[in-house]
Image: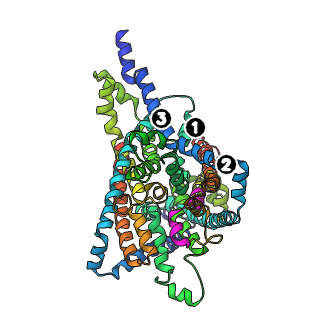
Amino acid sequence: MKLFKVQKNVLPGFGPTMAYTLLYLSFIVLIPLSALVFKSAGMTWHDFLDTITAPRVVASYRVTFGMALLAALVNALFGTLVAWVLARYDFFGKKIVDALVDLPFALPTAVAGITLATIYSGNGWIGRYLEPHGIKVANTPLGILVAMTFIGLPFVVRTVQPVVEELDSAIEEAAACLGANRWQTFRMVILPLLLPSLLTGFALSFARAVGEYGSIIFIAGNMPMVSEITPLLIITKLEQYDYRGATALALVMLLVSFSLLFVINQLQRWSRRFAG
Amino acid sequence: MADHTITRGALTEPRWVRWLLITVALAFLALFLIVPLAAVFSQALDKGLSVYFAALHESDTLASIRLTLLTALVAVPLNLVFGVMAAWAIAKFNFPGKSFLVTLIDLPFSVSPVVSGLIYVLIFGLQGWVGPWLSDHNIKIVFAVPGIILATIFVTFPFVARELIPLMEAQGKEEEEAALVLGATGLQTFFRVTFPNIRWGILYGVILCNARAMGEFGAVSVVSGHIRGSTNTIPLQVEILYNEYNYAAAFAVASLLALLAVVTLVVKSVVEWKIKTGSKF
């Protein structure tokens, strides 16, 4: 009996590695994040509410969350398409395309920012074909949408792709045997199976876009009330030494991030149960 | 026979649909990924090679390259050690609150980069918790190099750990137990048994961690103070050159980071392939 007990914990090192993990986590992540909460506790509730509901701030929420939502929708649609094409079809250069999907993860945001701003400007590679048709991308909210789509793209592809790859072909055969055509099979059998991962990718892409700063500020034009995102407003307040205002906005952003993280965790749990 | 064709058709899409889907997907990726990547290098070389190399040899740019290398050289090893320790404790042992701990480790990924920088200003800045004490003792953390390194450690914190935890969980602990039964010490077990099994996972985490450490912009921008030649990393140098309308130089410096991104993607693909095929070499 005793032997079994010993065997259960035969691996050494739990104490020290766990202690180090908790210590490092506390010093790098938890204590600094708690500073945000304590610093904003120094404000009165009234001041806090005034700061986070000022017209310019509310306008920044509208453009940040609105564009992030649109970008996540674009990514949900095209990301699923890309995931499907990569998982199901063969074509020349597929391996390279597959690797390239992660480019937005690897390319520093500042580089993405100045590049997108340049190609979508009036005489840029893409902008010069859009402006004659009256579509201005650079220095408008549309530019924010482009940047957010760019940085959020890999999330949907990388969450949906493995699920498509592991779909059991037997269920598609069953659908076909029962008389479904291909479109019916996709809509009524495959799509519901992809839904949890699709929603997870959507939420991840949305969460990333909401907090994004570097790739957006160069293309957005940053006009107050029109194309100014909330993270930029935090920096503007910091540069004016308005530490309280910056802290209050940062706390709002942090609470949004945490809520999204919670939703994403639930979605992932759901998709795992779905897959299992 | 007719039935047979219907079944086959029902299991895949008609040829024209397949081509249409592939074309639309590739057009989307070309527009959003390939065009920007090509544009970085095209803009960088727009004014010729001599302008390109002159921009890279500029003294502020060289200083920013040195600072970025220093930052990565400190942040990546620290997060590597943490990642291995955390993965060992989490993957090889059972304890209550495990999934909560994993969520906490992932936390920096869901925090906006701007907020990640701000929290260090709130602690070490003049208005911050320890700011007055630091300034009495002439220690500068924010708007100086230590702040840049701290913010970088924060944003790259989860990379190695989140690669290793699932990998080590999947591998179980039978091999380690066998080594211990045969008389190996704990460290021998780790370096001779565990390490060979996870080294591709470590490399994977390290290259992603490094790419983010060298490329981080938002968080570093908040704590940097933007002092030319001393607290500018490569991405901040790119911003300054761009805002001065010095586009050729901005894109020349940016091309270094784009090159790093391409190398990262190549190494990442190779490592993914190695992990998939279970290669240990």
Mark 2 or mark 3, which is nearer to you? 2
The answer to whether A22 is drawn above or below residue B204 in the figure is below
Disc 1 vs disc 2: which is toward the camera? 2
- Residue type indicated by callout 1: Ile
Q: Which mark is residue B27?
A: 3
Chain hosting mark 3: B
In the image, what residue type sits under mark 2? Lys
| Left or right position of B5 against B137 | left
In the rendered view, does A129 fall on the left or right side of B207? Answer: left
Which disc is residue A161 wearing? none
Work out whether residue B53 or residue A68 is closer to the camera in this orientation and state it. Answer: B53
Q: Could you say which disc has been placed on residue A96 in the image?
A: 1
In the current view of this chain or complex, which residue is farthest to the bottom? B136
Residue located beneath label 2 in the image: B47
Above/below status of B25 relative to B132: above
Q: State which tag comes first along the sequence, 2 or 3.
A: 3
Q: Residues within 10 Å of mark 3 (few under 14, many from 20)?
A: few
Using the image, name the chain to which the residue with label 1 belongs: A
Residue interval drawn in magenta: B210-225
Q: Are marks 2 and 3 in contact (CB under 8 Å)?
A: no
Callout 3, which amino acid?
Answer: Ala
- Does residue A163 belong to the magenta stretch? no
Q: CA gap, disc 1 to disc 3?
A: 15 Å
**In the rendered image, is residue B94 in sight?**
no
**Residue A128 drawn above or below residue B7:** below
